[in-house]
Image: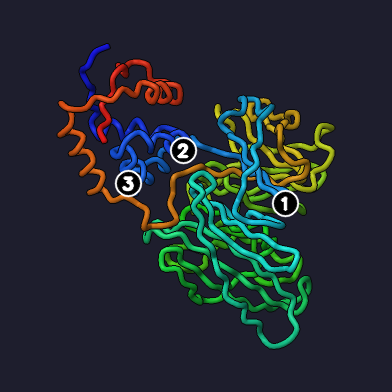
Amino acid sequence: MSERGIYIPAEVLTDILSLLPVKTLLRFKCVSKRWLALIDSPDFIKLHLSQSLKKNRNRNLLIGDTFSIHSADFDSLADDLATGVATKLNPPLEGYISALAYCNGLLFLSNTLEDNTSTSIIWNPLTREQQIIHFTPVQHPNGRFYVQIEAWFGFDSETNDYKVIRVALFCTNYENDDSFQSEVKVYSLKNKMWRDISSCPYFIRHLKVGGMFVGDALHWIAGTSPRLGTDNLIAAFDLRTEEWRLVPRPTFKVGNFFMNLAVLGESLCVFSNYFSDFVDIWVMKEYGVEESWTKICSVVQSTDICSFEYLKTIAYSKNGKQLLLGQDYFSLRGFDLEKKSVGKAVSLLGGPINFTSDIFMASLVKLNSTTTTSSSEVQIHQNKDQENTKQKTVKKSWCFKQVEDEIGIRNWRSHDLLIGN
């Protein structure tokens, strides 16, 4: 075997590694100091996440029941969305566990123990990093009130900060009251502190199932008051400006329907459920532009779907011809966008019987900024590698065999790879 080493330029190595799965990159951190510094650097983590979002890579199904959370590699599912394998996640929480929100590969989890105490964390299930969120007491107004309290989180791209928002809504009668009060607080993961902000001008409906993160904002179905029968609006909280606003709705058919939100790809999605008849699914192709709302399909009640009480969109299949749907907390089904038909239930080996389902993007995103590596540190390791090019050749063909398997590159020589210290 040749003793001549092959030095891979930094920009080429970065481009190659940015296409790999998170689990593979975590293993490759052990290859050398240079690779460790590169994979841990903020610039690379940002690039890898951007590539994942752009190319729909590193997608995972998040499947939760009362006491456990599972995940399944969505990209490994067949194009017909017929079968998959669920793996139990082991978050650092006990008791009843619920997934409150997710963003850029981070999960917002909370638990409840037998003594009714609870803990909330932001957790990266791939890197196992976590940050505990300590909530401040809710300030209840005087009088007897019906109370809803919930929290979500998302990413502020302007300040490069992840934020948790907690909303508490108070009203005297949930169904017949025309007025309400609210308390809104925002927690910065970067500053590790809570702040009070202006109250919410909209009454958020279905508080626990909202908080969809799109375009640096969280979104809910809301009304101008708690009273039933008032118009359903789409309210948004912008994490950059920390202000509330309305997002235009699609133009619906006339009739009674149940309306809710989801995220499909990187777009805001609305599904309007006309109860026992059909569900219309809309996608806002250009965020904030009312004319960009497009109805992508209508899912019609059939003998294959025994109930239409709850139906939500989860993700497009790998080839874009199927749409994965969650049905009534116990079934996942593929919908053929060309044939306009519902397929059989997806079989998830190792998964729970009753579950909620969502999709999240696996990532290298860090929660502890003190562990990140600066660009200058990466350059130092690159310079050391270049100085050692005539001294050290380390055979790592096993490493590039994995790279070839992951992204299908066959047209390079990987017999001897110079990787340095």
Q: Amino acid at mark 1?
A: Phe
For mark 1, give the secondary structure.
loop
Q: Nearer the viewer, residue 16 or 401?
A: 401
Asked whether, in this view, residue 320 is left or right of residue 3, the answer is right
Q: Quadrant of residue 353?
A: top right
Residue 378's x, y, as percent?
26, 44
Query: Which callout, 3 or 2, points at the residue further toward the start of the chain?
Result: 2
Q: Amino acid at mark 3?
A: Asp
Dot 1 alpha-carbon crowd within 10 angstroms: few under 14, some 14 to 19, many 20 or more: few
Q: Nearer the viewer, residue 374 or 218?
A: 374
Q: Residue at x 73, y 68 (%)?
A: 116
For mark 3, give the secondary structure.
helix
Which disc number belongs to residue 328?
A: none
- Mark 3 vs mark 1: in front: 1
Query: Which callout, 2 or 1, points at the residue further toward the start of the chain?
Result: 2
Q: Quadrant of residue 232?
A: bottom right
Cα separation between marks 3 and 2: 15 Å
Dot 2 alpha-carbon crowd within 10 angstroms: few under 14, some 14 to 19, many 20 or more: many
Q: Which residue is mark 3?
A: 43
Residue 405's x, y, as percent?
45, 22
Asked whether, in this view, residue 402 is left or right of residue 95, the answer is left
Q: Dots 2 and 1: beta carbons under 8 Å?
A: no
Q: Residue at x 68, y 28 (%)?
A: 83
Which quadrant: the N terminus? top left
Asked whether, in this view, residue 385 is left or right of residue 362, the answer is left
Q: Which residue is mark 2?
A: 22
The answer to whether any part of residue 289 appears in the image is: no
Residue 400's x, y, as percent?
37, 23
Q: Amino acid at mark 2?
A: Val
